[in-house]
Image (cartoon, rainbow, N blue to C red):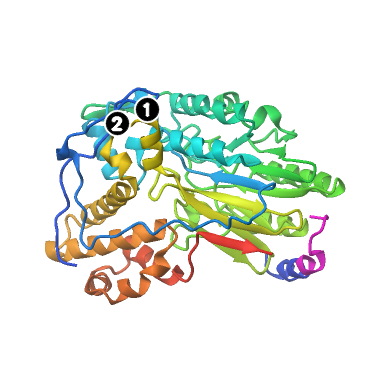
């Protein structure tokens, strides 16, 4: 970045980079998860039966309160960033057994309320009036074409309010064989989304307004204003089948170099966005989360003095800085996973920024639209219980056939669920001391061994040093 940046400092960092290259046992409630079946306007009152209530696991956890934004922050350069919506079209589920099992034994996505979450979120975006709304991939649950089409139809009202929407695909969105519709006790294949479909469906949300398009991927540039330009990077692999991990094509690197050169000559600030992570935000799931050979991308960004990078994919609220390359990466957590939050980014033309998260206020939305659903009216508690339940089930499923006594497994599952609730919210630092002193943690040390779940717990504990919901550079 040429304009107003601390160039000498960044040059020094890049030179250095050139050398290196980037409780008591309580059984889980067995009652099925509550699903929504009201009309697409989502305004009809619903009164689910009390039998669908999910009881809290012990020890009970609370979703920590959201970070309070700085009310004095400049709002003229404000972006709202959301990711991993994992939207599922209403016609693709009947809310019965197969769908319920997918929700309860998945990775925490609130697919049973994703339409309501999306509607409430978009209302908040319109009220906030940011410079633009960035959606950084995994827009659909598993690449169902109908899900993309339905989500795109909802984005129209944001554009109609004068707020540009810019999107890129995630690994779930294109050529995904897991695209499905749920009926009764089974699920069946749904129409998948091709790269051409994705571009067509989201033509009005970035692709049709692109300043430049990469002919080898779905990457493009988008002009925000006279001084700032988005570099929307397609980091997904779908040409030769479905892949979870991310990679930038060699031909796309050439295009990136051209766009950086053009931006430099025009005095433009570049804001890069991808679905996959630029850095090793997860030390356990590096292959699935970090862009392959990301050091090359970091070096290019450093060479052109780009100070920060936006991504998603991880589902966990996080950020990380590279001293070698002088770059900060902000990872926004999944909108459809508790606590269902998004990022608010105020930035300056000199590379400074202030980022904080905001939780979607589902109770306010339900009250405003006349929705009487008790889960929506008490959404923080309900979504917390759902996330607890998912992680409890994950541990119990993993060790189903093990020799670990059930009482011990239950304690381990409860602690794993509690830690992950806080980790997903970016606030594991608040309970890490309590967790490592819990007797259940000693059980994990005894039984965990080289198991991936234990490794992941250890990573969360090591990483729990700050609250990841607020980050700024002056």
Horizontally, is 213 left or right of 105 in the view?
A: right
Observer-nearest of 218 and 151: 151
Q: Secondary structure at mark 2?
A: loop
Q: Is residue 50 above or below residue 293?
A: above
- Residue 41 lies, in percent from the top left, at 40, 24
Residue 36, labelled with which disc? 2
First in sequence: mark 2 vs mark 1: 2
Is disc 2 in contact with disc 1, using a CB cutoff of under 8 Å? yes
Magenta-colored stretch includes residue 265: no
Q: How many marks?
A: 2
- Residue 152 lies, in percent from the top left, at 52, 27
Residue 42, labelled with which disc? 1
* Res 25 quadrant in image: bottom left
Horizontally, is 373 left or right of 281 in the view?
A: left
- Residue 90 lies, in percent from the top left, at 36, 26
Q: Residue at x 50, y 59 (%)?
A: 469
Residue 468, labelled with which disc? none
Q: Residue at x 29, y 60 (%)?
A: 61
* Range drawn in magenta: 1-11
Disc 2/disc 1 C-alpha distance (Å) = 9 Å
Number of residues whose C-alpha sits closer than 10 Å to that of mark 1, classed few (under 14), some (14–19) or many (20 or more): some
Observer-nearest of 274 and 38: 38
Q: Residue at x 62, y 58 (%)?
A: 354
* Res 136 quadrant in image: top right
Q: Residue at x 54, y 29 (%)?
A: 155
């Amino acid at each position: 970045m040429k304009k107003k940046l601390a160039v000498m400092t960044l040059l020094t960092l890049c030179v250095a980079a050139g050398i290196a290259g980037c409780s008591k046992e309580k059984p889980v409630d067995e009652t099925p998860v509550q699903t929504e079946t009201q009309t697409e306007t989502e305004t009809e009152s619903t009164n689910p039966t009390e039998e669908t209530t999910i009881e809290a696991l012990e020890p009970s956890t609370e979703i920590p309160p959201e970070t309070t934004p700085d009310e004095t922050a400049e709002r003229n350069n404000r972006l709202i960033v959301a990711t991993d919506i994992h939207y599922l079209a209403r016609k693709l589920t009947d809310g019965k057994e197969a769908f319920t099992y997918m929700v309860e034994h998945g990775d925490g996505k609130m697919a049973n309320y994703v339409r309501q979450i999306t509607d409430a979120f978009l209302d908040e975006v319109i009220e906030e009036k940011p410079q633009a709304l960035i959606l950084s991939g995994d827009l659909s649950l598993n690449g169902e074409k109908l899900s993309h089409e339905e989500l795109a139809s909802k984005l129209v009202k944001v554009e109609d309010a004068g707020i540009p929407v810019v999107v890129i695909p995630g690994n779930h969105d294109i050529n995904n064989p897991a695209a499905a519709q749920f009926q009764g006790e089974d699920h069946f294949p749904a129409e998948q989304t091709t790269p051409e479909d994705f571009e067509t469906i989201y033509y009005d949300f970035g692709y049709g307004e692109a300043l430049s398009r990469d002919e080898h991927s779905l990457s493009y540039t988008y002009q925000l204003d006279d001084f700032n330009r988005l570099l929307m990077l397609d980091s997904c692999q779908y040409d030769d089948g479905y892949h979870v991990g991310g990679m930038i094509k060699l031909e796309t690197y050439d295009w990136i170099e051209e766009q950086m050169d053009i931006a430099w000559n025009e005095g433009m600030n570049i804001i890069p966005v991808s679905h996959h992570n630029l850095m090793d935000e997860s030390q356990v799931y590096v292959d699935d989360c970090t862009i392959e050979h990301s050091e090359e991308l970091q070096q290019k960004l450093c060479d052109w003095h780009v100070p920060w990078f936006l991504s998603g994919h991880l589902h966990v609220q996080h950020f990380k800085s590279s001293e070698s390359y002088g770059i900060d990466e902000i990872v926004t957590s999944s909108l459809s996973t508790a606590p269902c939050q998004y990022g608010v980014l105020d930035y300056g033309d000199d590379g400074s920024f202030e980022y904080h998260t905001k939780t979607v206020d589902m109770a306010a939305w339900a009250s405003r639209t006349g929705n009487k659903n008790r889960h929506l009216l008490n959404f923080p508690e309900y979504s917390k219980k759902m996330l607890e339940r998912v992680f409890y089930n994950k541990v119990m499923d993993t060790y189903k056939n093990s020799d670990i006594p059930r009482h011990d497994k239950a304690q381990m599952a409860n602690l794993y669920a509690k830690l992950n609730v806080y980790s997903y919210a970016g606030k594991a630092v608040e309970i890490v001391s309590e967790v490592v002193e819990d007797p259940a943690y000693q059980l994990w040390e005894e039984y965990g061994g080289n198991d991936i779940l234990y490794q992941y717990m250890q990573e969360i504990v090591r990483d729990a040093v700050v609250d990841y919901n607020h980050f700024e550079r002056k």
